[in-house]
Amino acid sequence: MSTFWSIWISVIVLGTIFGCWWLLWATRKSQTTDTETEKTTGHSFDGIEEYDNPLPKWWFYLFIATCVFSLGYLALYPGLGNWQGLLGWSQEKQWEEEMQQAEARYNEIYAQFGDVPIPELAQNEEANEMGQRLFANNCAVCHGSAARGSIGFPNLTDDAWLHGGDPETIVQTIQGGRQGNMPAKGMMPNMTSEQVDQVVNYVLSFSGREQDAAAAEAGEEVFSQACASCHGADGKGNYAFGAPNLTDDTWLYGSTYDWIEETVLYGRQNEMPAQGGRLSEDKIHILAAYVYSLSND
């Protein structure tokens, strides 16, 4: 926060507190008596007269205590612009302390599963419950609470994997993340509109859905030049590149002509953020076992 805004906020906050104090003092000074009387202010409405009685002392002192408390609080805690308070408290520090306490408390629980092989751990009900909570906190925002994914985010409950679904690969994916890049028009940046139509029809022909059989036949050559280096000559994908299998019924961005055409024309870029810096090895181990269990009953 800049110095100007820091001073601006401090003036408003302190001005409000001292303004309230002045209002109390001025009101107190204007009172003609400290006790209740039958004297009225002269104001009457609907037959009801307004008495000129002082503010109750307990109420007055409560207002004063509120002002004093406010000044004490602002001296100890942040609230005046860039002032950090005499105690040096911040919500970030408190969060970090709570996280350290939680780590110290729960790390032993996670550690007891650290040496259990993932296929075996995937059958452990207690470990799966822990893994499900880790998944909900760290993965569900993209893959969904049921791990079925959505457009651009893989379904983790089937057997279609971009990089492989064995335990070691799942751990690597969670630990280091993944970076996906489908270049526009594949390896043929000068691909014409006609060739785009041909390769789209050829991809659709893998499942017998081409719109133009002649275009699909011509698209085989385009596919071999633009796409086969990643997806393979048979279109079954390649774990090394994270290239999906184009011959199954699993599609990350949709399987209609328009969806595939858009993918060919503009490419796709995906990123799976690495969790290695956020989660301990034991947590990743349990999370990997949970993900493994989703597609291995």
Image (cartoon, rainbow, N blue to C red):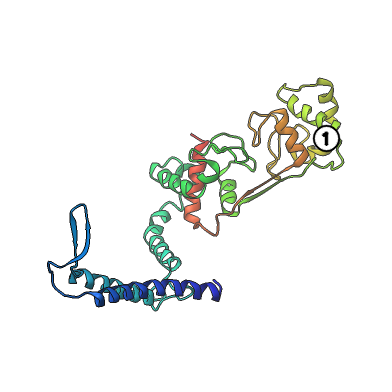
Vertical comparison of 84 with 50: above or below = below
The quadrant of the rendering that contains the N terminus is bottom right
Residue situated in front as seen by the camera: 164 or 219: 219
Q: Is residue 190 left or right of residue 98?
A: right
> Residue 261 location in percent, x, y?
75, 33
Question: How many marks overall?
Answer: 1
Q: Quadrant of residue 153?
A: top right
Query: Which residue is label 1 attached to?
Result: 224
For image coordinates 66% across by 29% down, the residue present is: 248
Q: Secondary structure at mark 1?
A: helix
Write the residue at 48% across / 43% down.
290
Q: Is residue 263 left or right of residue 281?
A: right
Please state which of residues 22 and 206 is positioned toward the viewer in this rendering.
22
**Which residue is at the front of the view, 47 or 190?**
47
Asked if residue 107 is positioned above or below residue 37 in the image, the reply reads: above
Q: Position of residue 143 (x, y in %)?
A: 54, 42
* Above/below status of 66 relative to 210: below
- In the picture, residue 256 is in which quadrant? top right
Camera-side residue: 67 or 73? 67
Q: Position of residue 53 (x, y in %)?
A: 18, 68
Kindly identify the residue that appears in the image at 38 percent across and 55 percent down: 109
153 horizontally vs 219: left or right:
left
Percent x, y for residue 255? 68, 30
**CA neighbours of label 1 inside 10 A, class few (<14), some (14 to 19), many (20+):** some
Amino acid on which the number 1 mark rests in the picture: Ser
